[in-house]
Amino acid sequence: MSKPLLEIEGLTIVFPGGRGSLPWQKQPDVRAVQDASLSVGLGETVGLVGESGSGKTTLGRAVLRFLKPVEGSIRLGEFDVTGFGRTVPAAYRNEVQVVFQDPVGSLNPSMIVGDIIGEPLTLHKHLKGEARRKRSAELLEQVGLRADHLDNYPHEFSGGQRQRIAIARALATSPKLIVLDEPVSALDVSTQSQVINLLEELQRDTGAAYLFIAHDLAVVRHACERIVVMYHRRIVETAPADAIGEQPTHPYTELLLASIPDPDPEVQQRKSKHRRAITSGVTGATGAAPTNSCPFADRCSHVMDICRQSFPDEVATTTGGTVACHLHTSGPRLGGRPLAELTGHAPPSSTRQGSTS
């Protein structure tokens, strides 16, 4: 196996606590990501999925070097990202780009499209004048927009078109990795499909790798080759995209699958019943989970005493991924086999497999 393009090992990110209500009080630090490890290969699309607050966007921002971790390492090719000082090398910015969730907020409303796309061409490729405009027009056409849109402003475009402009800007430096942070969540269903298809086409043309961050498992299954599942700052499961929907090995992944809506009333009813079964008997405890326990323990119907005492070791799965769950090493000792072997039923089938919503 060739060496991965992006390697993250044991990453921990902590946000310092702010001031309390009284001058001498201090809020506790917030551990946003803990001991996270993942890799992305050349030209590969890896999905990072989890509910809001799981730490996935924070991890992506660390890859972009918007945040500095307190522990662990990030390597991209020859770059030791965690070793950077206050100034990030321009060569690294050239290799890694980002497409944000909200194209309205990420595009400067006072700049025409030609300048939005042209700015990184000047900063990183040193193109000016007619050469810059020509390359900007090529990039715009590459994402399915006309070259004569270069002189328009962002407010003159639809949401899907604005996201295409953001993608064109990201492609301007010919990056090896693009961090896609919820790139389609602000778009309607049909536009989501168009943008994902565009990203797949561009990847075939450019060879760029994607770290695709999203909360919607249905979208991630459609767009990615491998999926990394995060819950409450921890990575709990990794698996090939085609396996995770049929043979989840972690109860939280099973819950995510059961939460995908389905237009078929019968399937949706089975999913609702399945979702209740996953969390049956749960006390609904709230608040931050201890850092030395399984964060899903208070929502899991399979919880054991050991789940509240320690975070489980990572185990290789029979589906070609990894899982961090005590069900695989204690109690039933699944040993990396699908969760269905314990529950006796597979996730309810969906008429929307491969859907982008």
Image (tube, grey):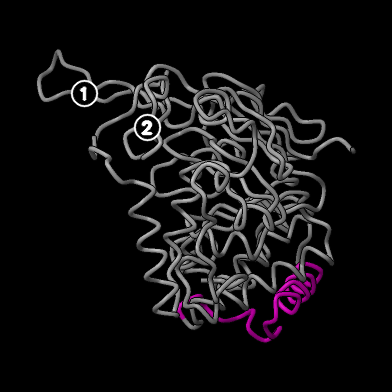
Magenta segment includes 140: yes
Which of the numbered marks, if any, corresponds to residue 303?
A: none
Q: Magenta segment, principal secondary structure?
A: helix
Mark 2 and mark 1 in contact? Answer it, CB < 8 Å: no
Q: Residue at x 76, y 75 (%)?
A: 142
The mark that comes first in sequence, 2 or 1, is: 1
Disc 1 target residue? 19
Residue found at the far front of this picture: 344
Q: Which dot, 2 or 1, sits closer to the camera?
A: 2
**Quarter-of-image position of residue 296:** top left
Magenta segment includes 299: no
Dot 2: element: helix
Q: Which residues are magenta?
A: 130-155
Q: Is residue 37 above or below residue 306?
A: below
Q: Residues within 10 Å of mark 2 (few under 14, many from 20)?
A: many
Q: Residue at x 53, y 50 (%)?
A: 49
Q: Residue at x 25, y 32 (%)?
A: 287
**Quarter-of-image position of residue 282:** top left
Q: Quadrant of the N terminus?
A: top right
Q: Mark 1 is on which residue type?
A: Arg
Q: Residue at x 44, y 59 (%)?
A: 258
Position in image of residue 265 (x %, y %): 39, 79
Left or right of residue 103, residue 46 in this image = right
Left or right of residue 98, residue 295 in this image = left
Disc 2 target residue? 297
Residue found at the far top of this picture: 24
Q: How many marks?
A: 2
Q: Nearer the viewer, residue 265 or 178?
A: 265
**CA gap, disc 2 and disc 1:** 30 Å
Position in image of residue 246 (x %, y %): 62, 57
Left or right of residue 357, residue 74 in this image = right
